[in-house]
Image: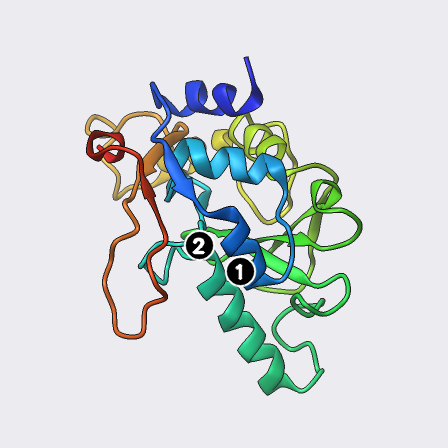
Amino acid sequence: MSQVDGIARIVGLSRSRRFTVDWQLIESDIGTALPQDYKELAGYFGPGHFFPYVTLLVPGVASPALELRRSLQRWQRLDAEDQGENTFTPVPHFPHPGGLIPWGNSPHGEVFYWRTVGEPDEWPVLVLPARGRDLYEYQGGVVSFIHDLLTDSLDIPFLPSLAQLNEEAELDPDIDLDEIDEVRPEFQPDDGSWPYDGALPVIAGFEADDAAD
């Protein structure tokens, strides 16, 4: 069983959503190849949320909240406005040498990046907290990182573990524990189709209609 299949089992997704991307076109547009494990992950899951931690950015969809190139362009504009001061992130974004490419974000404001050092399959994962500038670095790919995150195998100072999230729920007087289940990993699918003015052309999608259910 591959690690992508392992993640699917953890989050309760019974089969691939068969999300297809013209990677040659996407990589030409971005200006670099992307890691193979990420392509496999995107192909299996498509756009969506690895609750409670990560919203996966994928290329080629309409939604600006889920489109990888749109997110990178936004950070590149902020870098240009910042004029080299690195106000927003300690490291500037690609195509700066060794620059960052965002591949995910969290509901709480954390951003998940690659740092483009070496070959794409060697890029480390970096996590930027919602507040502060202390980057957490993971020497492995996106798939291994998400697997370890969802199995409580990482100690990231600014991200609560699943055990901590459940402890907080038990102590929250506004939460009726009789009405909620344990906080546990799940995949919340999205079709990436939120329309908006100025969207990038839609060049990715699902192989069959029922794959996005």
Q: Residue at x 61, y 53 (%)?
A: 113
Percent from the top left, x then y, of residue 83?
67, 87
Residue furthest top in the image: 1
Q: Is residue 43 above or below residue 84?
A: above
User: Residue visible at 45% across and 46% down?
Assistant: 56
Q: Quadrant of the N terminus?
A: top right
Quadrant in which the C terminus appears = top left
Say few, some or many: other residues with alpha carbon within 10 Å of mark 1 (under 14 / 14 to 19 / 20 or more). some
Tell me if 153 is positioned left or right of 213 in this view: right
Q: Residue at x 44, y 21 (%)?
A: 10
The mark nearer the N terminus, 1 or 2, is 2
In this figure, which residue is indicated by the disc labeled 1?
130
Kind of element beneath mark 2: loop
Separation of disc 1 and disc 2 at Cα?
7 Å
Residue at 71 percent across and 67 percent down: it is: 91
> Which one is in front, 98 or 32?
32
Q: Nearer the viewer, residue 102 or 69?
A: 69
Q: Residues within 10 Å of mark 2 (few under 14, many from 20)?
A: few
Q: Which residue is mark 2?
A: 108
Left or right: residue 121 compared with residue 69: right
Q: Are marks 1 and 2 in contact (CB under 8 Å)?
A: yes
